[in-house]
Image (cartoon, helix red, strand yellow):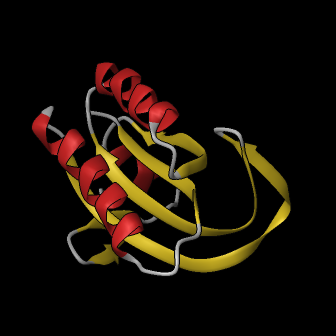
Amino acid sequence: MPIYEMLCITAHFPDYKHISGLVRQTALHIMDAGGVVRKIDSWGTRSLPQRMRRHGNYHQIGDYWTLHFDTAPRTLLSLNSLMRRDPRVLRWTVLKLGSRPEDIAREGRRAILGDRYDKLDI
């Protein structure tokens, strides 16, 4: 299964339960499709580089978070559909890091294994 990284910008809410629910929903969607969630990282609340409009509302502050995961390419289609429909999501992008952890390590990048970053020796 290919390894992906998703960066997501969500609308800012005073209580964190909205963002937590979205992250949980996204992770469960990937795991229900047979994927593996490797790491979830919050970048915190930041001012947006420009005013963003999504679902009829304008936003100037957003919460940033990343998700590293392995899944089949077909699951990305349903994940994109899920993110597109959710009113909490302002922007998102998914990057393919590699086809296998060994490919990432060969290129000199760090593979994500468990709770820490390790360099694979191959």
Residue 77 is at least partly visible in this image: yes
Quick one: 65 or 96, which is closer to the camera? 65
In which quadrant will I find the C terminus? bottom left
User: For residue 92, which quarter of the picture?
Assistant: top right
Q: How many marks?
A: 0
Quick check: 115 above or below 108? below
Residue 120 is at least partly visible in this image: no
In which quadrant will I find the N terminus? top left
Would residue 58 appear left or right of 75 to someone viewing this image? Answer: right
Please state the horizontal and vertical placement of residue 97, each as a whole percent of the image: 48, 45
Quick one: 63 or 87, which is closer to the camera? 87
Quick one: 120 or 18, which is closer to the camera? 18
Quick check: 49 above or below 115? above
Q: Residue furthest right?
A: 50
Please state the horizontal and vertical placement of residue 78, each as a whole percent of the image: 34, 24
Please state the horizontal and vertical placement of residue 19, each as a whole percent of the image: 41, 66
Q: Residue furthest front?
A: 56
Quick check: 28 above or below 39? above
**What residue do we see at 51% from left, 52% from top?**
88
**What residue do we see at 58% from left, 42% from top?**
93
**What residue do we see at 39% from left, 33% from top?**
82
User: For residue 53, which quarter of the picture?
Assistant: top right
**What residue do we see at 15% from left, 32% from top?**
33
